Image (cartoon, rainbow, N blue to C red):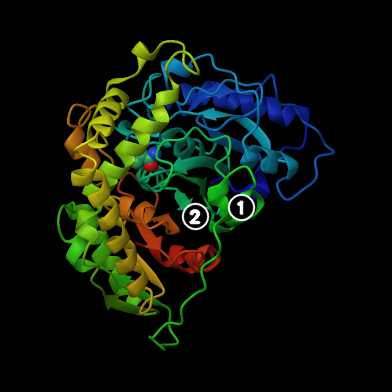
Amino acid sequence: MKIIENSKINSDRELNDLFQLIEKEDSQYHSFLSLHKNYTKFDENRRGELANVPIAIKDNICVKNTIVTAGSKVLEDYISPYNATIIEKLQKAGAIIVGKTNLDEFAMGSSTENSAFGPTKNPLDRSLISGGSSGGSAVAVSANFVPVAIGTDTGGSVRHPASMCGVIGFKPTYGEISRYGIIAMGSSLDQVGIFGNEVGDIERVFNVVRGSDSKDSTSQIKKIKKLAKTNSSEKISIGIPYHFIQKGLSIEVKEKIGLLVQKLKEKYEIIDITLPHINYSLAVYYIIMLVEVASNMARYDGVRYGKNKNSLGDEVKRRIILGTYISSAGYADKYYHRAQAVRKLILEDFKKAYLRVDYIMMPTSPVLPWKIGEKINDSMSMYLMDIFTVPVNLAGLPAISLPTKRDPLSVGIQFIANQFNDDNLLNDSKEFLEIIETI
Ligand code: GLN
């Protein structure tokens, strides 16, 4: 298990060895789309929190003078003229960007099979999907190429692949990390996330990349004052919305949740909570996200960006068509505006719940990783895989997926905190993980 402290590169030779190792071993997983061998040199003078730590970056994040494909043929040879803010920050902290990782085309998907460059395979079992859309970043950490990797999470794209591949995936509060230089999918939902094998490593990277940025107005949200809890218990309290997680869970996931709750009860207060509107999350997400996707994708018209829009994949085309339809005159009220109203109710439900509990816990995914190809022609069952992750993006909350023991039966357990409680969430996750790993 690679962690930051043991992964620092100490010489030219070590960096070369790492590139060689990835070139050789990654042919079985396809987690990287490009290696930055020719742009990256070892420099012993690098200083900072992440000095000479190798990091992998999802290929929808711009690194100056290098190709950024977003997993699409449309951007196959597009070279970014500038750095994303998070790349500037990582490089200033001394990190080495080793390369760009595979993703579902424009981050749309839950398995990385929608990448125009072929799927990424799961290191726990190569016949299985890696999850998505940041499957490449999850695998780069799970296969021990790098200690930490960066992804994006619009509806679960960091937490879901983390859960599939037995690693940790963290999505901060909406607005905590600048999205400048990140190829947009659903702008009111998108957030950068971090993969790692240790919570402390994720914390370190988060503290480097977080903070407001004048180039991204959504990163300048005023921090909301935390309301006092009405629950005066000394113990940390964890709410579980049983009514929501009853349906659709596979036997394996159900069993592990049951075991975990027993163990958590020894230390924490476990409370059965109700989130009255959460059942609408998937429907609301797939309306709002589609409308924002249709709007964001308009720039790939072959004039501004994109060499040939005809080479867009089916899933992306489907979303552009649906999003355009939903937001067109006459339909916007029926779908989009209604979804916005329900989104507010979902957020209110969460806010009320956090008056009683510190965290909300549920599985990250309803099922274990499935076989590559199994759901590729069934969009609806693929969308259902996002059921437990999308409410978090709709409400802009921070959440983390923590893995049970690392084997093909590993289950991701999601802990969700109130807005801007990212630090507490990370801190308490260290203890949660110790318990979860024993399951
Ligand atoms: N699986 C979800 C979707 O396809 C989430 C994608 C994401 O978070 N980028 O929309």
Residue 232 in the image: x percent, y percent?
Answer: 41, 89
Residue 349 appears in the rendering: yes
The answer to whether residue 227 is left or right of residue 207 is: left
Given residues 190 and 427, the one toward you in this image is 190
Given residues 422 and 430, the one toward you in this image is 422
For badge 1, the amino acid type reads Arg
What secondary structure is marked by label 2? loop
Ligand 1 in which quarter? top left
Residue 81 in the image: x percent, y percent?
Answer: 65, 23
Given residues 58 and 279, the one toward you in this image is 279
Residue 293 quadrant:
top left
Q: Which mark is residue 210?
A: 1
- Crowding at dot 1, Cα within 10 Å, few <14 / some 14-19 / many 20+, comes out as some
Residue 124 appears in the rendering: no
For badge 2, the amino acid type reads Pro
Q: Which mark is residue 299?
A: none
The extreme left residue here reads 247
Residue 338 in the image: x percent, y percent?
Answer: 23, 51
Residue 320 in the image: x percent, y percent?
Answer: 30, 27
The span from disc 2 to disc 1 (Cα, nearest Å) is: 9 Å
Q: Which residue: 77% across, 48% down? A: 48
Task: Confirm or deny contact between disc 2 and disc 1 (CB under 8 A).
Answer: yes
Q: Which residue: 36% across, 38% down? A: 292
Q: Which residue: 56% across, 26% down? A: 22
The answer to whether residue 390 is left or right of residue 148 is: left
Quickly name the residue at label 2. Answer: 172
Quadrant of the image for the C terminus?
A: bottom left
Given residues 408 and 345, the one toward you in this image is 345
The answer to whether residue 12 is left or right of residue 380 is: right
